Image (cartoon, coloured by chain):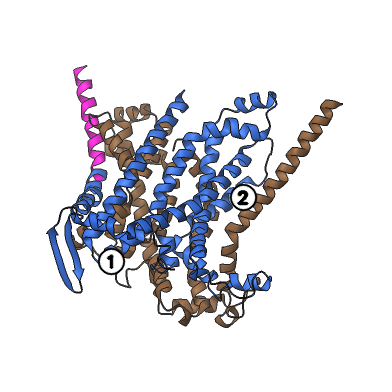
Chain colours: A blue, B brown
């Protein structure tokens, strides 16, 4: 008896041993950088020409400057506008497709073909996709050429010089890259719903529309919140697409400059103080959003077990 | 009679709904594929053909364009090689160590297990961009700038992959099997490598694909870390192409380069799509 208890204990120390690689790498490459990023935000430290200024401890002056300059609110606004422009159509189309794919009475054929095709853009290199859109929508590019030959346009539309069209292009790329992924997530949620609920509703004479609004959607609510908040967290990190599309300028008139593009600028110009303050701001927002995700996925588990 | 009519009506309703859904699905499939079709066509056309406007038929300059690209100013082949090295190592490291971490949490009952599990879940959402500043300072101090190590080693700690593996283990790894192996006298490391890993192959394959593609497409971190031409990966070269004075370029080459970065992934995806789309759904059930 005694021997057995001892051997169990000696097995369990392997739990710690197997965790060593994860913990060491996490501490070195994530935790230490996080702490030093936060530390940086309290120091004046930047390059003035070739001369390094600082680091001098200045308390929260970087934060004051960050929020009083006003740039951050503009970039925050840009990021949110482009996220919403991509997310609203994404969630509508994904819900619709997931409902169709999971509807047994529709019996859609070629489902695998459609799923494969709509998921495809998610795997494309975002920078190459943005470069592709840049060339396709150039003033003398193929889209203008097609629109003119179809008689829709008389002269080339300058997609890259117009606030609305640049934002629309970014939103459209984000939409194309993510709606397939969201469809598959929601579909998995819908397939998990007890089919007897649908059968009972059908017997009671409910229309497909009623079933969708009264049964499917309420049950899916936790997954919808999860999708929305994770997409929002991803949206705050929006970088590759607008960076490549506008060559890092966020033009026209910085209307497509996102928060991470702003951070990237500080990192390149070695403005550590302001970069740190901006990172902490992003970290706090992401943290709040993550807590919301956590709360809702916890609820989801409860539903699953009930 | 009346029942029949109702049935007819329902049938008709299903038919028209089915038609509508095929049409809408068709439109969105077109929207997903159209850009890549234009890319494919334009990669086969010469600069002068491209300047005359778009035609839907391919031309015959694909190999000329690729040849020009490979002998041009951008180190594209080298970039692809770098991308393959980084992505492959990143993916191996990520999958192996995530499985190991998941195994530690799943199979052993130690004091801090729940605390560590909660901690890993809590750090899941920290974006890499937020720690980038400290990360760059750190690897500058470690003299690892302009090497592949900062792009590969951090993959050891990938909470999302860990979580997927943990979920999979709950259904695919019976503890009795481990007990049996222990009675046979196998060591813990050997049990993990020869018994657990083979059972985890389906989950590891799915995550290998995702981490490979994720690393292949990654632009933010490599752009901060890699600085010499010899080390640059494909996304950085794409960004340079965008940054260069655009009009001076041979457009055939520009399209060839974009195609060169996009189509390998598309081809691999089409071969493996069954596992990718299926694996996504499997992870989503609990996600």
| Viewer-proximal residue among A159 and A205 | A159
Q: Determine the residue positioned at 34% across, 38% down.
A: A291
Q: Is residue B197 visible?
A: yes
Question: Could you say which quadrant of the image residue A190 lies in?
Answer: top right
Query: Residue A251: where, in percent of width, then height?
Result: 42, 68
* Image: magenta residue range: A1-21
Report the chain holding disc 2. A
Q: Choose the circle earlier in sequence order: 1 or 2.
A: 2
SS assignment at label 2: helix
- Measured Cα–Cα span from mark 1 to mark 2: 43 Å
Q: Quadrant of the N terminus of chain A?
A: top left
Indicate yes or no whether the magenta region holds residue A39: no
State whether residue B2 is above or below residue B217. Answer: above
Q: Which mark is residue A113?
A: 2
Q: Is residue B275 left or right of residue A7?
A: right
Image depth: mark 1 or mark 2 in front:
1
Q: Is residue A175 left or right of residue B60?
A: left
SS assignment at label 1: helix
């Amino acid at each position: 008896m005694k021997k057995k208890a001892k051997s169990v204990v000696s097995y369990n120390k392997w739990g710690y041993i197997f965790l060593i690689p994860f913990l060491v790498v996490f501490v070195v490459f994530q935790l230490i950088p996080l702490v030093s990023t936060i530390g940086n935000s309290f120091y004046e430290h930047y390059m003035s020409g070739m001369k390094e200024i600082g680091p001098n401890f200045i308390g929260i002056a970087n934060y004051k400057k960050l929020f009083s300059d006003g740039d951050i609110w503009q970039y925050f606004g840009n990021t949110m506008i482009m996220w919403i422009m991509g997310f609203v159509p994404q969630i509508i189309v994904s819900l619709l497709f997931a409902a169709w794919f999971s509807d047994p009475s529709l019996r859609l054929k070629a489902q695998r073909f459609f799923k494969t095709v709509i998921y495809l853009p998610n795997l494309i290199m975002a920078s190459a996709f943005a470069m592709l859109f840049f060339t396709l929508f150039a003033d003398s590019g193929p889209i203008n050429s097609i629109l003119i030959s179809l008689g829709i346009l008389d002269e080339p539309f300058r997609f890259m010089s117009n606030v609305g069209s640049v934002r629309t292009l970014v939103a459209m790329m984000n939409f194309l890259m993510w709606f397939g992924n969201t469809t598959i997530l929601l579909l998995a949620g819908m397939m998990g719903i007890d089919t007897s609920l649908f059968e009972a509703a059908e017997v009671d004479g409910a229309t497909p529309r009623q079933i969708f609004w009264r049964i499917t959607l309420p049950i899916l609510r936790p997954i919808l919140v999860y999708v929305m908040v994770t997409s929002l967290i991803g949206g705050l990190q929006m970088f590759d697409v607008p960076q490549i599309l506008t060559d890092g300028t966020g033009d026209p008139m910085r209307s497509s400059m996102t928060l991470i593009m702003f951070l990237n600028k500080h990192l390149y110009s070695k403005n550590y103080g302001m970069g740190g303050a901006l990172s902490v701001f992003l970290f706090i927002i992401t943290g709040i959003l993550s807590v919301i995700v956590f709360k809702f996925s916890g609820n989801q588990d409860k539903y699953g077990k009930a | 009679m009346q029942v029949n009519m109702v049935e007819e009506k329902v049938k008709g309703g299903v038919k028209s709904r089915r038609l509508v859904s095929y049409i809408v699905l068709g439109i969105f499939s077109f929207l997903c594929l159209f850009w890549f079709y234009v890319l494919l066509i334009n990669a086969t056309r010469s600069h002068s053909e491209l300047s005359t406007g778009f035609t839907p038929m391919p031309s015959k300059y694909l190999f000329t364009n690729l040849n020009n690209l490979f002998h041009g100013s951008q180190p594209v082949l080298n970039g692809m090689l770098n991308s393959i090295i980084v992505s492959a190592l990143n993916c191996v490291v990520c999958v192996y160590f995530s499985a190991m971490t998941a195994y530690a949490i799943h199979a052993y009952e130690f004091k801090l297990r729940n605390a560590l599990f909660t901690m890993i879940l809590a750090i899941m959402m920290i974006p890499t961009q937020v720690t980038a500043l400290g990360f760059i300072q750190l690897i500058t101090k470690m003299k690892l700038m302009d090497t592949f190590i900062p792009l590969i080693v951090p993959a050891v700690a990938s909470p999302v992959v860990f979580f997927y593996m943990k979920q999979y283990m709950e259904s695919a790894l019976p503890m009795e099997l481990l007990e049996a192996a222990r009675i046979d006298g196998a060591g813990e490391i050997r049990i993990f490598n020869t018994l657990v890993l083979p059972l985890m192959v389906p989950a590891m394959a799915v995550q290998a694909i995702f981490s490979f593609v994720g690393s292949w497409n990654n632009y933010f971190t490599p752009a901060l870390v890699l600085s010499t031409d010899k080390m640059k990966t494909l996304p950085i070269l794409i960004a340079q192409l965008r940054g260069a004075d655009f009009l001076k370029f041979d457009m055939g080459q520009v399209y060839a380069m974009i195609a060169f970065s996009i189509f390998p992934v598309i081809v691999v995806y089409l071969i493996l799509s069954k596992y990718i789309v299926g694996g996504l759904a499997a992870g989503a059930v609990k996600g």
